[in-house]
Amino acid sequence: MFRGVHMLMGADEGAAWKDGEPRESRMVFIGRDLPKDPLLQGLEQCVADVDAFNWEEHAADR
């Protein structure tokens, strides 16, 4: 779980997924007049291409 209020940010692991439970994540933005397009553009830049990622190179990171 990641949360931010003004300039303060925090993160927790949250509960583990149960067997058979769909593994999905959600992002919720709460605020007034949030600029949708810049938020979406910023999120789209964070999408990883798992097919292009070199898993062997980063095996020690896991």
Image: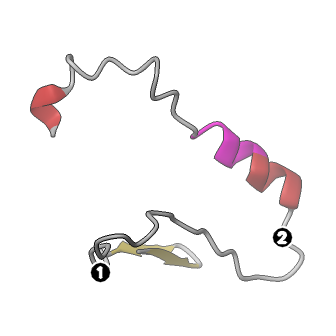
Main secondary structure of the magenta stretch? helix
Q: Which residue is mark 2?
A: 34
Secondary-structure class at tag 2: loop
Q: Which of marks 1 and 2 precedes in the sequence?
A: 1
The vertical placement of 43 against 10, above or below, is: above
Residue 53 image position (x, y, % from top left): 39, 21
Q: Is residue 11 above or below residue 42?
A: below
- Residue most toward the left? 60
Q: Is disc 1 placed on a helix, strand or loop?
A: loop
Residue marked by disc 1: 15
Q: Provide the residue span drawn in magenta.
A: 41-46
Q: In which quadrant of the rendered image does the N terminus lie? A: bottom left
5 up-or-down from 57: above or below: below
Residue 4: x %, y % from top left: 52, 76
User: Would you say residue 47 sits in the magenta stretch?
Assistant: no
> Residue placed at 59% from the left, 78% from the top?
6
Q: Measuring 64% from the left and 36% from the top, which residue is drawn there? A: 45
